[in-house]
Amino acid sequence: EEDGYDLWLRYRPLQQASQVQQQARSISYAGKASPTIQAAIDELRRGLQGMTGKVPASGTSVADGAIVLAKAGALPQGFKADGLAALGPEGYLLKSATVNGKRVTVIAANEDIGVLYGAFGLLRALNTGKALAAIDERSVPKLQLRVLNHWDNLDRTVERGYSGQSIWNWWELPDIRERQYVDYARANASLGINGTVLNNVNSKAEILTAPWIAKVAALADVLRPYGIKVYLSARWSTPLELKETKTADPLAPEVAAWWRAKADEIYRTIPDFGGFLVKANSEGQPGPQDYQRTHADGANMLAAALAPHKGIVMWRAFVYAAEKPDDRAKQAYDEFKPLDGKFAPNVLVQVKNGAIDFQPREPFHPLFGAMPQTPLMMEFQITKEYLGFAMHMAYLGPLFEEVLKADTKQRPNGFTVAQVLEDTDHGQRPTGMAGVANIGSSRTWSGSHFDQANWYAYGRFAWDPQGDSRAFAQEWAMQTFSREPQAVTQIVDMMMRSREAVVDYMTPLGLHHLMDTGHHHGPGPWVDNLGRPDWNPTYYHKADKKGIGFDRTATGSNALAQYAPGVAQRWADPRTTPEELLLWFHHLPWDYAMPSGRTLWTELVARYDRGVTEAEGLRARWEKLKPLVDGRRYDEVAQRLDTQVREARWWRDASVAYFQSVSGLPLPPGARKPE
Ligand code: GCU
């Protein structure tokens, strides 16, 4: 019975097993294996056993049919690894070669971690049907920090987690080191994820006390061989709350001294500790502004404490306050843009993909490309807070890709978000991407089988922000479900359509933040009685008798002015604004003529209808796959798709009925009838 625990590391038997077995008879490494090299050897043994039916021998000699693990400086004699040095500490190359007359496959890298990534790369190649005999691949991560953000609380609840309890069993740490931590490390290393922030951005002071540091150190020990550093979310007011200082003012010497001593304490037990992630002056969290200091003052004080240990600060730009009600979308840019160039070199500003909050669709965040003097890292949300939790199928690959490929036009020849992140002009500056994890202790890790693909795609994009979401879906499906071409095609097709279906039945044409209060599951466009205006869905859609949408042009909030002129000019006119962002930027009359020739109202209803039809289509497609998918996983997915169809109809019916109640318009001819 497949329960999903093995993720994409299932290593099912290959059709060409006997041939591959000839080419992978042994694993050779010439030196004394470090824990990282040992992890590579173990993974190759596990994977090859699964795929070929035989466990390869391992040792130091190079025989015919060997997989040779090699580091620069100790390459097999006669093997030419052109350009190896350029692959950096984490890159690798895979090459079939003849060495001393023996046919071998070489995994070469500069450092141990590159060898481990290469081993996973080789297994992925085999798993997705590539032939070893002609393999010739090289791969280098384009971002330095490829990080998961766990919004995990210390009581094992997970903020916006839909996959059971936190996998961190804090009660039993540091003594009990669960096997699942190793499997977590393997899964992440297979994608190249090299950092994890263990605790929620809404952080507690206790995490930085000695007993908790000991627990964190135990996790760091388990993750280290897999190249994964641990980081912590730090609560701004920690020293004050622990009553060890009288203030949390970043410019007070006692505060800076406290953080320096705290950093020293952490690094004594975790010498490769990554650093801090900070949510400050956002949604009620404390921060430097409580003392009339800036985000830069706060970040730089922490950065100074970490710098002697080579630690970094990831300072979040997700800020918005009730006192600025005109447009929440503007606040991050307003606060951070003036601070460009004011951050210490070991600070990255971590920016959500869009200016509101992980909606099914948002335009890219205007800060990307707008802070040239500051390293910016991306924050994506893998857990689907606003896309149906783990109950709806929504493959996020296309969402990630859409944002990464967006052109900020901050340079004359174009400057995509991916290029902003890669920051190739500045050489040594840190670069990175963070993903809010969807991992928990559910048997599937991610709450559902298909949500594993979102973890997978995130990791692949963090390695290569210019990657291709369809290719990642295909790789994932082949490794996770089936190599049967018919099954792969169908599964990939479902995945690729799924996110747009969610956009259509929840928030079409640029609508956003219409989810019901607090939990964000299900429709709530009518909600207008919350304590803060910018929490109410009515604030975002602004529908009335005459029209709908948020005017962010010069006649409205003018949030558009935060984008480069090339973007702002195009989006200032509804005629040249992409339809999918229309109501994000414009308030338009219900009878506005859409390019389709329909009125806005008719088009809006048609989008809602299309979303439901697409959800029904996902369900029907899955049914056809029944003979090709194992029973347990088939059923578990089918139940979720049934739920999705029901909830898509709920979204559609409730939203259309509500907008009708505001506009007074009848259902357009040909529209679906409410269920
Ligand atoms: C969203 C989410 C919160 C989270 C916040 C953040 O608002 O609903 O749960 O804390 O984002 O990113 O800080």
Image: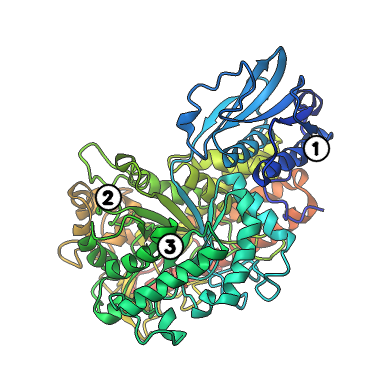
Mark 3 residue crowding within 10 angstroms, few (<14) / some (14–19) / many (20+)? many
Camera-side residue: 521 or 92?
92
446 versus 154 height, above or below: above
Three-letter code for the amino acid on which mark 3 is drawn? Phe
* Image depth: mark 2 or mark 3 in front: 2
Residue 471 is labelled as none
Label 2 Cα crowd, 10 Å radius (few <14 / some 14-19 / many 20+): many
The residue to which callout 3 is attached is 358
Instruction: Tell me if label 2 and label 3 are in contact, CB under 8 Å.
Output: no
Q: Relative to the observer, which residue lies in front, 217 or 279?
A: 217
Report the front residue among 23 and 653. Answer: 23
Q: Along the polypeptide, which appears first: circle 1 or circle 3?
A: 1
Earlier sequence position, callout 2 versus callout 3: 3
In the rendered structure, which amino acid carries the disc numbered 2? Gly
Seen in the image, is 557 located left or right of residue 405? left
Circle 1 or circle 3, nearest the eye:
1
Please provide percent x and percent y for residue 6.
72, 51
Q: Which numbered dot is residue 369?
A: 2
Tell me the quarter of the image containing the C terminus: bottom right
Residue 49: numbered disc:
1
Q: Are marks 1 and 2 in contact (CB under 8 Å)?
A: no
